[in-house]
Image (cartoon, rainbow, N blue to C red):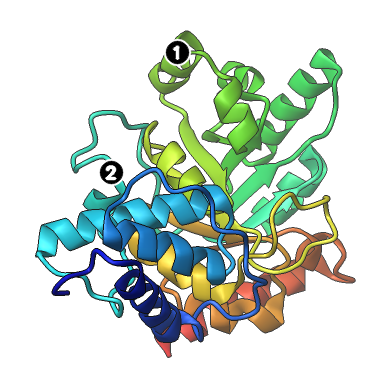
Amino acid sequence: MHNAHNAHDGDAMAEAIVAHHAATFSGFAAEPTPAPTSQEPAYRAALKACSALGFIAHDAECVARAWQAQTQRTGAFDAAQWPDEPDDFGLQPLPRAQAFAPCPNRLGLYAVLPDAPWVGRMARAGVPTVQLRFKSTNAQAIAREVRAAVEAVQGTGALLFINDHWQAAIDAGAYGIHLGQEDLDALDATQLQSLRASGLRLGVSTHGYAEMVRADAVGPSYIAMGAVFPTTLKKMATAPQGVGRLGMYARLLRHYPQVAIGGIGAEQFAQVLTTGLGSIAVVRALVNAPDPESTAAQLMRDMADIKAG
């Protein structure tokens, strides 16, 4: 851009970004533009454009800063180039200084299950990755369920992640744990250190750019992204992200194993896999199925066919 300093050029830059990317990010209502934290033209244009495209304040801020970094790095503002360089977002350079033990790059079909019997059932059905999402406040019940789940996957080859109950997971010798953003934020430095030292793999849930940057700081084993589609499971704090956003997230996080989660049924597998993600998490698609074993087999075939195709 020649003189990008006056407001008119800033508006034109913002409009150019929206024009290039509106189709990718369709379906979101515009958000109010947050107060700018920098006067740089590329940053201000991107902040305005991202808000118009429906990104909430802290995600708009995150992309706008990356756009500014990209503009400085390349020496030119380019409305067509949505930022996806890890460096421009301040992600850890490779190899990461902070990192949890690695897990497979493609976790495949990932079943999120309510109790140990379900975990055993889906592990025996050949599902490669399973998660115990056991809701309880009773420490003994939690410890018992986590131990039972660890026993249930013995000899199956399934990788078992425990949602939330990380101390019980360490005690029982699970493969890994899965934490939401709030759980991650609740850990102090000592807890995070003992978690990393345990050798357990860590998966982290994210719902947008700012949370991905936050997750990257601890170097998890995989990053989950969602909710991709509307889900009835819990009241969602954030709008469904959609496949357009998912594709952009996948490009930014290409150096991580990635899991798509949230309202994904068999009929959406193809569009989710077009983003290049190596894993899809399902909850209701299995738990509510009349024959969960054959449904699991069909979903795994679908994933293999789509990847091959």
The location of residue 149, given as percent across then percent down, is 71, 35
Front of the two marks 2 and 1: 2
Secondary structure of the residue carrying numbered label 2: loop
- Work out whether 244 lies above or below 89: below
Q: Residue at position x 77%, y 68% from top?
A: 285
Sequence-first disc among 2 and 1: 2
Q: Residue furthest left?
A: 75
Viewer-proximal residue among 278 and 244: 244
- Work out whether 138 lies above or below 87: above
Q: CA distance from mark 2 to mark 1?
A: 21 Å
Q: Which residue is mark 2?
A: 90
The location of residue 204, given as percent across then percent down, is 53, 41
Q: Residue furthest top?
A: 190
Secondary structure of the residue carrying numbered label 1: helix
Q: Amino acid at mark 2?
A: Gly
Q: Amino acid at mark 1?
A: Ala
